[in-house]
Image (cartoon, coloured by chain):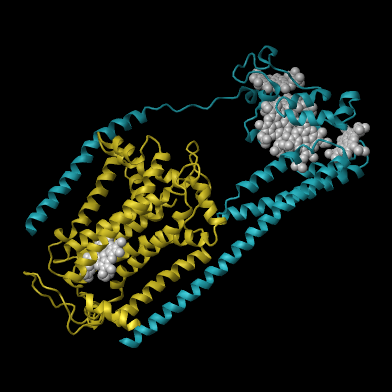
Chain colours: A yellow, B cyan
Amino acid sequence: MLKAIKNWIEVRIGLDELVRDQLTEYRIPRNINLFYSLGTVAIAAFSIQVLTGIVLLVYYVPHPDHAFKSVQGIMMDVPYGWLFRQVHAVGSNLLVIVVALHMLSVFFMKSYAKPREMTWLVGFAMLLLTLTFCLSGYLLPWSQLSYWATTIVTNMPTAFPYIGDYLTEFQRGSSQVSGATLGRFFALHVMLLPALLVMLLGIHLFLIRRIGISRPPFGPGGQERVEWTQFHHESYPDGMPFYPHYIAKEVFMIMVYLSAMFFIIAFLPTLFSPADANIPADPFKTPAHIKPEWYFLAPYQMLRVIPSKFLGITLQMIAITVLFFWPFLDRKEERNILKRPVLLGGFIGALLVWIGLTIWGNF
Amino acid sequence: MGKFLRQSSVLFIVLVLAVPVLAGYRDIASNAIVNQAVVESEIENLCLTCHESAMMDEKRRKIPGEWRASWHFQNDVSCHNCHGGDPQDAALAMSPERGFVGVPKYQRVPAFCGTCHIGILKNYLASGHGRALMENGSGPNCVTCHGAHNIQKATIDIINENRCSQCHSYDRAKEMKHALSRTEQKIEDIEASITRLKAARVFTEEEDKEVFRTLAEFRTLFHVVDVSLVKDKTDDYLKRLGVIDKKLQGIFSELDSRRNFSVFLLLIFVGMAITGYLLSKTYS
Ligand code: HEM
């Protein structure tokens, strides 16, 4: 019976060929490393966010009078509600880490080089979307933390001349963060952003498969280069099979991700939830220490340290723009970053500055 | 094409740069306005100037120091808030025209403090102590138990053998202290539990309110020196607090089982990670 069904499908869409092309006969470079699995971990992590998000959506009420209470209900009354909320909340933080690591490793191995510039651009757009996801989700519990962190962040565009105030008001839907803001952020978080992200992810994956995975610049065969003047699939006939060899590694990495998540949920359940996250939003009472999430701390601290707000914003805009267009700005042929001391120095320097600012911003 | 992309991204960066440069003018302008803001100077208290100086005798010179160590000082209750007068005007500082009332007589002290502690004054006057004071001056007044200048946050140890056996035997006082401190202890325990739950980010608004309500009622007993009434009431409060406590303990054990369940899942995923790792080893 099962075979009959399989055959029925096989006749119509050629399942066997698909499995052969995409799994068993799909071959990847022999010197491929574990960092290449981070993209897949990101997909898994994103899927977990979608699934737990749907469960939360069943009970969550996007209204200033009910949002906080409904979240409390999820934590205390809904059976295993706490589990879904914790996985979603801790997961959002870990997802940022995974996507950032993925980008860093792509950068480090120069996988963005011709012909993969578009993959980088789409990926970068997904990073920005991921951060927007976090930002919009942060407001939804309607706690003091949500409210005031959102107030700070939505206030940043006022540094722009002429249109700044308008931009801020457009984000908030009113002059203050209010029920109107909650409505907007809710719609973004559960409809618009997921749709956009899934679309971009489709393009990202299409590009990766269409072009073929890049060869890591390290290890045996790392220096082999093909002049890219005309389109062709970059394939590795003598490479290692994607299934089951590399899939096993990817499963391993996804399990590491889940282990990290449950380590936090079991032993550090309040890691991402400061005291203000447990107090309902009060627009008339500003908490003593307002801080944005840890991944926004570095840019936030930078704005505080640099005396002129406009200079700070400028530097950040430049940094983002340069990073976005990096594949077009990086003109060196050398793919191994270890042989490019200036770039390597800049890379490590920027990382250290980021970490330093984050630690500093904590005080 | 590649060249075009490169050139247009450089152009884009230049554009992005240009916008904040314009913004800078606005920034600088608004900074200038902020810098003009005046700093409020601290207001001097002239009562202290004289009363800390050598014009006071030894005993009275100690008063400002005692007051600085007090709970009132921390809550901005100053000399003139109790004694009246005008701390800004040296000449008329202690003139009755400026509301100066001087030092209250023994029997006038409750009314003196009661201008602010209205509820307590009422309870006190209705009590055996208040009645005894008003009738013949034999009851203790506020200062007998709390002092006048070095007033600290009240604790149950205000009731002690030294103080309470001056006018009568300590027995009844001791019974009262016992009933009060049992309840106080229970409230402290529950408040500690709530603090722990808050640290675990459990929202305890309902319990907070219930404890607060009980505490407010409990406080009305402090100045009622009717031992059997105090006993009845505190028994009642203990029962109420017991219900809250049970609920809190339930949340604690829920948190425990959540942790256990998370550890269980953690072990499963670690196991699967190890399996995946070993599996990938067998392929290479
Ligand atoms: C939600 C976020 C993202 C997901 C789910 C995702 C997913 C993936 C996956 C599954 C791969 C193939 C395997 C691998 O190399 O890891 C990949 C490759 C790639 N990603 Fe992403 N990615 C994301 C964000 C990004 C970001 C932020 C960038 C850089 C700005 C980026 C740039 C690239 C590039 C250039 C490749 C090609 C690597 C190669 O061919 O060797 N991606 N991505």
Residue most extreme to the right: B169
Quadrant in the picture for residue A57: bottom left
Instruction: Between residue A8 and residue B63, name the one nearer to us.
Output: A8
State the residue at coordinates (15%, 48%).
B12
Q: Position of residue A195 (x, y in %)?
A: 30, 55
Is residue A87 rendered to the left or right of residue B138?
A: left
Q: Nearer the viewer, residue B183 or B160?
A: B183
Instruction: Please provide percent x and percent y for residue B23.
Output: 24, 37
Residue at 42% across, 77% down: B273
Left or right of B200? Residue A302 is left
Ligand 1 found in image quarter: bottom left
Tell me how many marks there are.
0
Note whether A73 is above or below A19 in the view shown. Answer: above
Instruction: Name the image quarter holding residue B99.
Output: top right
Q: Who's the residue at 64% across and 52% down the image?
A: B194
The location of residue B142, given as percent across then percent down, is 79, 31
Estimate the x, y position of residue A353 in percent, counting from the top left.
Answer: 32, 57
Q: Is residue A272 above or below residue B159?
A: below
Q: Is residue A297 visible?
A: no
Task: Name the image quarter holding the N terminus of chain A.
Answer: bottom left
Comparing A156 with A126, the one in front is A126
Identity of the residue furthest to the top in this view: B97
Q: Is residue A315 above or below residue A17?
A: above
Q: Is residue A34 visible?
A: yes
Nearer to the camera, A188 or B176:
A188
Vertical relation: B59 (above or below) B165: above
